[in-house]
Image (tube, grey):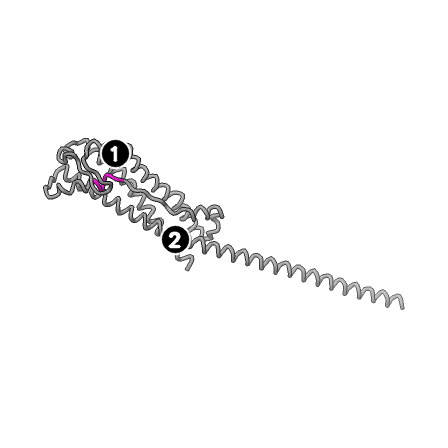
Amino acid sequence: MINFLRKLRRENMDGKYIKYAVGEIFLVVIGILIALGINNWNENRKAANFEQEILEEVLASLSRDATELYQLQISFEEADASIHKTLLFAEGSRDKSQRDSIPYWLGKFMSFDRFNPSSSVYEVLKSQGLQNITNKGLRLLIAEYYDEAIPAIVEALRDVEDEFESSMINHIKAEFRDFRFQEMALPNDIDAYLNDHRNIVYFKIFRDNRNGSLDDLAYGIGLNKEIRVRIQQEIN
């Protein structure tokens, strides 16, 4: 009888120990899960804060680009209008009241522009990982703008500048008696200059080269605007 009681007591003690051990394990597991949850919450909060900050910086860079791109577009459109009026005069109208405007039209057209995009923030974003932008559509638009649109604009503008430096400077030296960059280009003899069909053909080739830049500018401006709108929706 005594042995039976001792055995029963041991079994009760073993049962209590097992329950205690299971309880301890359960508490440890719960503690680990809570710690992991807190850690994940902190990481998610850090990622969300970084995304907010980087989007605000991208927005500021895009706004700076937009101002410069609009100015470039206006400059190119004015140049295109100037050569259009010059060609109309040379090829038919010969309106004497417009003759004095020819040097200013030529000066506006015989030029080039440069663009310095604000892309440093995009380089930071790439180094940290584009996946930090959680909105996939927005992420793709940002990459398209900086990896495609901006390089296309820079290259198009460089083509115009290269053409100016490689041939137009020599042309100006040979055919013009006064020149002020983006302001005025006065031929030695306006009538003789415009009567030379080679000059007209040269203008048309240079115009077509510039018009290609206008298309790239329009594409970049439209994409820039769309991204700014999308970012505003994300951060507000």
Q: Residues within 10 Å of mark 2 (few under 14, many from 20)?
A: some
Q: Residue at x 27, y 37 (%)?
A: 209
Q: Which portion, as a residue range, is magenta?
A: 107-111
Mark 1, secondary structure of its residue = helix
Left or right relative to 68: residue 141 = right
Left or right relative to 161: residue 50 = right
**Residue at the disc numbered 2:** 60
The quadrant the N terminus occupies is bottom right
Q: Nearer the viewer, residue 95 or 106?
A: 106
Q: Residue at x 67, y 62 (%)?
A: 27
Residue 69 in the image, given as x and y percentages of width and height:
32, 47
Q: Residue at x 15, y 37 (%)?
A: 90
The quadrant the C terminus occupies is bottom left
Number of the label disc, if any, that sits on residue 169: 1
Left or right relative to 92: residue 165 = right
View extreme (left): residue:
96
Q: Nearer the viewer, residue 97 or 34?
A: 97
Residue 74 in the image, given as x and y percentages of width and height:
26, 47
Q: Nearer the viewer, residue 182 or 143?
A: 182
Amino acid type of the residue that numbered disc 1 sits on in the rendered structure:
Ile
Total numbered labels placed on residues in the image: 2
Q: Main secondary structure of the magenta part?
A: helix
Quarter where residue 38 is shown: bottom right
Amino acid type of the residue that numbered disc 2 sits on in the rendered structure:
Ala
* Residues at discs 2 and 1 in contact (Cβ within 8 Å): no
Q: Residues within 10 Å of mark 1 (few under 14, many from 20)?
A: few
Above or below: residue 98 compared with residue 37: above
Q: Earlier in the sequence, mark 2 or mark 1?
A: 2
Give yes or no for residue 166 being in the magenta stretch.
Answer: no
Q: Residue at x 13, y 42 (%)?
A: 100
Quarter where residue 232 is shown: bottom left
In space, the residues marked 2 and 1 are separated at their CA atoms by: 37 Å
